[in-house]
Structures are given as structure tokens and as C-alpha cells.
Image (cartoon, rainbow, N blue to C red):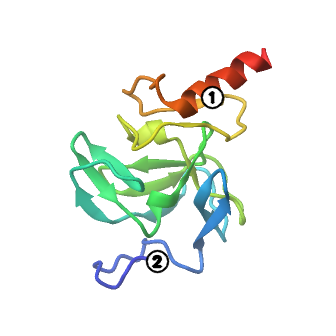
């Protein structure tokens, strides 16, 4: 899945194991697994360009340093109940629960990001869903029209 310009690593994701596909209009693109992984198993090693700015499809390595991966990990979908953990220091992706063939690879964006490229309403459907997704150190932007619409739907649901 990674270009040949990257140094070879046998633990990089392979196209026979994963595919980036468009899930739907709401979620956009995601990574689907074609194979099973057991809880605790290494899913893959990730790679990408190291950058200093926050972009869509970038993952925070540390404050001020991000991994821009437009081939694999940058397309993981968000879930408040993820099935993978990202070790950004060692670039390892590990299953935190069993993953079956046909499952999307799901991460909690607040696990790696202090501040998101863009806040958004969550549609993961998990029992512990937070509803509105921000980075772990980021306040909700209540002036965001999308948030205002989201807040109105929450009030209407009560």
C-alpha cells in the first residue's frame, strides 16, 4: 500500500490485507481489513511524511510533529470504541479487540490528537459515544455552525 520510495518493511500494510474504500457520504473513506486480527496482535507498521502542521489525514506523533499518511493510517475512521491502538513513537498499530475480515479499522482520534484538523459530530454508534469529536486538549468550538446544528438536535432528542 505504501509507495516503493519507502524503505521496505515486512510489517507495512499489504493490499491483500487492507483496502482504502469510501464508506459513505457521512464517514468518507476508511480502511477495511480483509483478514482477522486477535486482540493484542500487531496489525501493521505505519509510515508517512513527517510534517509540522495539522492536516486532514495526519496523525500527531508529538506536539508540533505529525505523520501525514495518505496511503493507510490517515484513513482510519473514528470510533469512541476503537479496535486499534496507535503507538505513534514506534509507528505500531495494535488490535485492542478482535478484528474480523470485513471490519473497518477504527481509532479514537482523541487518542493521538491534541487538536483535530476539524471537529465533527460522531456517528460511531458506540454505547460510550461522546457525540462531538475534538482533540484531547481541544475545547468544543461552539461557534461552528455544524456544532450549533448538532447541539439543537441533542436538545430536540431530550
Relative to the observer, which residue lies in front, 138 or 83?
138
Name the mark on residue 1: 2
For disc 1, the marked residue is: 149
User: Number of marks in the image?
Assistant: 2
Task: Estimate how packed mark 2 is, as few (under 14), some (14 to 19) or many (20 or more) residues with alpha carbons within 10 Å.
Answer: some
Q: Quadrant of residue 112?
A: top left
Query: In front of the other: label 2 or label 1?
Result: 1
Res 76 seen here: yes
Q: Residue furthest right?
A: 157
Residue 105 located left or right of residue 47 = right
Residue 73 percent location from the top left of the image: 46, 60
Closer to the camera in the image, 1 or 92 = 1
Would you place residue 136 above or below residue 84 in this image? above
Q: Is residue 124 rendered to the left or right of residue 84?
A: right
Q: Secondary structure at mark 1?
A: helix
Q: Residue at x 38, y 49 (%)?
A: 87
Amino acid at each position: 500500500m505504501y509507495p516503493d520510495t519507502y524503505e521496505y518493511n515486512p510489517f507495512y500494510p499489504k493490499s491483500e490485507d487492507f483496502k482504502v474504500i469510501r464508506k459513505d457520504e457521512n464517514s468518507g473513506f476508511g480502511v477495511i481489513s480483509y483478514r482477522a486480527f486477535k486482540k493484542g496482535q500487531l496489525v501493521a507498521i505505519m509510515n508517512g511524511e513527517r510534517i509540522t502542521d495539522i492536516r486532514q489525514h495526519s496523525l500527531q506523533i508529538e506536539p508540533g510533529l505529525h505523520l501525514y499518511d495518505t496511503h493507510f493510517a490517515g484513513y482510519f475512521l473514528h470510533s469512541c470504541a476503537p479496535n486499534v491502538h496507535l503507538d505513534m513513537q514506534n509507528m505500531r498499530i495494535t488490535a485492542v479487540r478482535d478484528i474480523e475480515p470485513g471490519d473497518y479499522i477504527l481509532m479514537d482520534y482523541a487518542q493521538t490528537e491534541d487538536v483535530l484538523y476539524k471537529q465533527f459530530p460522531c456517528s460511531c454508534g458506540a454505547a460510550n459515544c461522546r457525540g462531538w469529536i475534538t482533540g484531547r486538549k481541544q475545547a468544543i468550538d461552539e461557534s461552528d455552525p455544524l456544532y450549533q446544528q448538532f447541539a439543537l438536535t441533542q436538545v430536540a432528542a431530550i
